Amino acid sequence: MTIIKIKRKQDLARLRRLALSAQGLLQTKPYGNSLVGARKAINHIGYVQIDTISVVERAHHHVLHSRVPKFKPSMTNQMLLDGDIFEYWTHAAAFIPINDFRFSLPYKHAIKSGQVRWHKAKDRKLMDELMARIRIDGPIRSRDIESNTTKRAGWWDWKPAKKALEQLYMEGDLMVYSREGFQKVYDLTERVLPSHINSQMPSIEEFALHILERQLSCHGLVSLKGLTYLRRNPELRMAMKTLINERLAQATLEQIQLSSGEIFLLETGTLEQPLPRLSNRLLILSPFDNSVIQRDRLKSLFHYDYQIECYVPAAKRQHGYFCLPLLYRDEFIGRMDCKAHRKTNHLEIKALHIEQHSFDDEGPITAFIKAITQFCLFQQCDTVSLTKVYPHNLTRHIQNALKHLG
């Protein structure tokens, strides 16, 4: 089968624009504003990862903020309450479009049948008691349940009732009805799931097709590895390979190879389609943004070597605890380690790392200042400070530009 080799710089730039456009990161408001825009955004990108780290606004809010003007964090829970989205597991905990509910069923079945183990041991008696209580008393939070078990450090020492709730949720008997802050509120799936939603178990072929179509739509180009990213299901991987080979034989998909050797797939004719024009805009992205979460893909396509370092021992960190990727036009030009101090409404930029000569002219600096202004509003911060800049020769210039922000 023919493989198109990408050698010219302008061809790689076109692929980058294709990928960013598919993610909704080139257009100013690709999905519209506010709640309506947030609904359209998550329906297009397929999921928004949930993360507990709150150094800045949490990831699931940050991802939507990057794509939807006038987005507010309260809108995520509103979509949950309205039945637009549901919470479950993709490669990690995530908010997912409600219309994709049936594709969560294979993993739920695997956990319930014991093919995949969530907790080491199930307390089926306690699980049955919890189901009965929720059926009678209504939605419940894990902290609503009394337990005499002493709570110790570490997720493996969760009190039994919380483990049982989590097991019921992962098996599909319970759904997250809403969130109060970061506290989950559980209810019976039959009461949470809208009646019009398809809840039929998909075949493995249907599941593979869903993943392929979803990722082509939201990424523009995909790799075989990326299609089954962190999905350790041999049958699914085999079904995906079969589907890809069929599509290549039918010439509805074509293959391209980057200079790194990595092969990507895209719909035939995609390379000839017009793409949005670039604007001099800088975006401050979440480390868990859909566009950067597949680190190997990011490195191959954008030559951007990125790692979140909050899980790295402090002595081994190169860029900081929670560095945020910086996207300018169609390039990732640096990263920013920062913290929102909510008691004082202050955004502290601990370190700003700029790649090579990215800030040699005023365009990126002007775009950075504009992005920081919007980011401060999103973080509900009134002032901002900058401690370190790499390379150091840019420190005074950027600090002076930030002065009017406080």
Image (tube, rainbow, N blue to C red):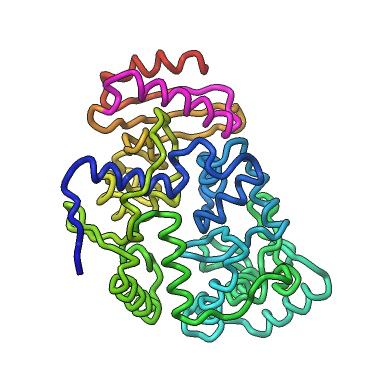
For image coordinates 50% across by 54% down, the residue present is 45
Quadrant of the image for the N terminus? bottom left
Figure check: 383 above or below 6: above
For image coordinates 41% across by 67% down, the residue present is 212
Query: Could you tell me if residue 288 is visible in this image?
Result: no
The dominant secondary structure in magenta is helix
Nearer-the-camera pick, 30 or 149: 30
Q: Residue furthest right?
A: 136
Side of 101 relative to 134 (left or right): left
Q: Position of residue 345 (x, y in %)?
A: 59, 28
How many labels sit on residues? 0
Nearer-the-camera pick, 263 or 382: 263
For image coordinates 38% across by 49% down, the residue present is 292
For image coordinates 52% across by 31% down, the residue present is 375
Side of 180 relative to 385 (left or right): right
Nearer-the-camera pick, 245 or 159: 245
Side of 208 relative to 250 (left or right): right
Q: Position of residue 6 (x, y in %)?
A: 19, 51
Query: Could you tell me if residue 311 is visible in this image?
Result: yes
Among the 4 quarters of the image, the one containing residue 96: bottom right
Q: Position of residue 388 (x, y in %)?
A: 35, 25
Figure check: 233 above or below 181: below
Q: Position of residue 196 (x, y in %)?
A: 71, 70
Bounds of the magenta segment:
358-385
Figure check: 363 above or below 165: above
Residue 363 included in the magenta stretch of the image:
yes
Residue 116 included in the magenta stretch of the image:
no
